[in-house]
Image: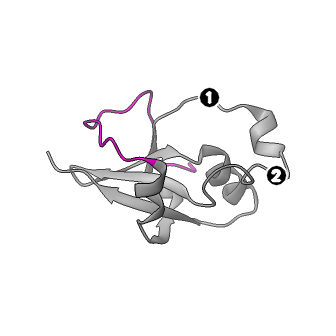
């Protein structure tokens, strides 16, 4: 199994972070098998695009809530890492309080 679980939607409260605020969160390595996805589908064109990071953040966005790590954005990056047999992903992790 690549991920801890495949979810559908965001179970955590809205954090209301802007792109600028996400950019201030330092990236760190996260194990793929600790992530719960918030999307259950992926656009194949996004996964295969060579310039998929050109217009967005270079790092995935992960929300930590109630001891779990939720992959909010960057599903294509996580799958690309898995296809390249890398067990970790560089992501910005933001902890949301209850």
Tell me the SS state at disc 1.
Answer: loop
Crowd tier of the residue under label 1, counting other residues whose Cα lies within 10 Å: few below 14, some 14–19, many 20 or above: few
- In the image, is residue 12 part of the stretch drawn in magenta? yes
53 or 68: nearer the eye?
53
Residue visible at 47% across and 65% down in the picture: 30
Query: Relative to residue 20, is residue 72 depicted above or below?
Result: above
The total number of labels drawn is: 2
Does residue 71 appear left or right of residue 11 in this picture? right
Query: Relative to residue 17, is residue 39 depicted above or below?
Result: above
> Which region shows up in magenta?
1-18
- In the image, is residue 50 part of the stretch drawn in magenta? no
Does residue 40 appear left or right of residue 44 in this picture? left
Tell me the SS state at disc 2.
Answer: loop
Horizontal and vertical percent for residue 14? Answer: 29, 36
Mark seen at residue 41: 1
Residue visible at 41% across and 28% down in the picture: 9
Q: Are marks 1 and 2 in contact (CB under 8 Å)?
A: no
Crowd tier of the residue under label 2, counting other residues whose Cα lies within 10 Å: few below 14, some 14–19, many 20 or above: few
């Amino acid at each position: 199994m690549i991920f801890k679980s495949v979810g559908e939607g965001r179970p955590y409260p809205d954090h209301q972070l802007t792109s600028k605020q996400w950019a201030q969160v330092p990236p760190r390595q996260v194990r793929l098998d600790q992530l719960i996805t918030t999307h259950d589908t992926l656009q194949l064109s996004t996964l295969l695009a060579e310039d998929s990071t050109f217009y967005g953040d270079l790092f995935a966005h992960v929300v930590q809530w109630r001891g779990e790590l939720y992959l909010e954005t960057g599903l294509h990056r996580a799958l690309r890492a898995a296809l390249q047999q890398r067990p970790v992903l560089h992501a910005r992790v933001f902890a949301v309080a209850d």
